[in-house]
């Protein structure tokens, strides 16, 4: 057995290590507590909402509603129904209701004076126009054969004079307001049929009364 004065005092030498480990444990617990507290604060703080980007919208003029378009078209349909019983040449187009009156009914060849036989037809059309507020375009047409007489120098002059005569008749004799009436002429350049046959040229010599979808102001 070794005497006590030869033994190494290990217990007293290692006692400081126990205290050092205790300090490290306390520091670890301290830092863990701080980290947990910081994490809980981050969870409680609401996240900032991302900025909203609003695109500027161009101003748009409201278009005509389907109800308004339908009402305008219904007016033309009623006018067409009223005129069909008179056996007129009618076409419903995008511009409006087209009433095509041949020159053979309205005028003598090369003249712009309305035939007396055409008056009942004009009167029927005027009755329909009187009951609706629509604007009306009077369009003169001619065939491709040049004309030159003491009254007219060209087909332009003739077709314009004929549409003007219808305008004067509607406004002066049948009371259609002139503010509703428009005058136009295409001469020979908007044919309805071929100009190389007598039948086609007869179709091209005409005045169109176009009841437009637009109403008078």
Image: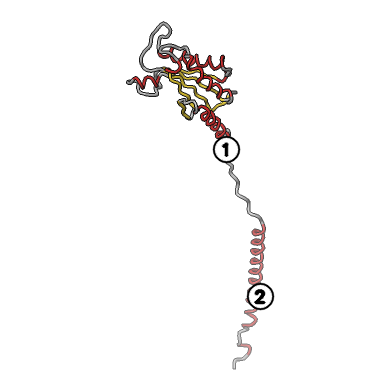
For the point 47% across and 16% down, the residue is 117
Residue 63 makes an appearance in the image: no
Q: Residues within 10 Å of mark 2 (few under 14, many from 20)?
A: few
Left or right: 140, with 79 as reference point: left
State the SS at label 2: helix
Residue 55 makes an appearance in the image: yes
Q: Which mark is residue 19?
A: 2
Distance CA(mark 2)–CA(mark 1): 73 Å
- The image shows residue 104, relative to residue 69, as above or below, that is above
Q: Which mark is residue 170?
A: none
Kindly indicate the quadrant of the structure image that contains residue 89: top left
Kindly indicate the quadrant of the structure image that contains residue 158: top left
Q: Earlier in the sequence, mark 2 or mark 1?
A: 2
- The image shows residue 82, relative to residue 150, as above or below, that is below
| Residue placed under numbered mark 1 in the picture | 57
Q: Quadrant of the N terminus?
A: bottom right
Nearer-the-camera pick, 89 or 146: 89
Place of residue 196 in the rendered image (x, y in percent of width and height, measured from the top left) = 32, 20
């Amino acid at each position: 057995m070794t005497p006590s004065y030869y033994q190494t005092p290990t217990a007293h030498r290692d006692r400081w290590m126990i205290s050092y480990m205790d300090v490290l444990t306390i520091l670890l617990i301290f830092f863990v507590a701080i980290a947990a507290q910081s994490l809980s604060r981050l969870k409680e703080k609401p996240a900032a909402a991302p900025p909203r980007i609003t695109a500027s919208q161009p101003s748009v003029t409201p278009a005509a509603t389907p109800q308004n378009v339908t009402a305008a078209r219904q007016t033309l349909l009623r006018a067409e129904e009223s005129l069909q019983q008179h056996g007129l040449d009618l076409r419903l187009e995008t511009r409006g209701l087209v009433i095509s009156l041949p020159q053979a009914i309205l005028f003598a060849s090369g003249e712009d004076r309305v035939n007396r036989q055409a008056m009942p037809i004009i009167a029927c059309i005027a009755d329909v126009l009187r009951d609706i507020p629509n604007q009306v375009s009077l369009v003169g047409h001619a065939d491709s054969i040049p004309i030159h007489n003491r009254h007219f120098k060209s087909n332009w002059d003739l077709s314009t004079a004929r549409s003007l005569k219808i305008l004067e008749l509607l406004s002066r004799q049948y009371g259609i307001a002139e503010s509703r009436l428009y005058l136009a002429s295409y001469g020979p350049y908007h044919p309805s049929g071929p100009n190389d046959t007598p039948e086609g040229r007869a179709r091209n010599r005409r005045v169109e009364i176009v009841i437009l979808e637009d109403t008078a102001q």
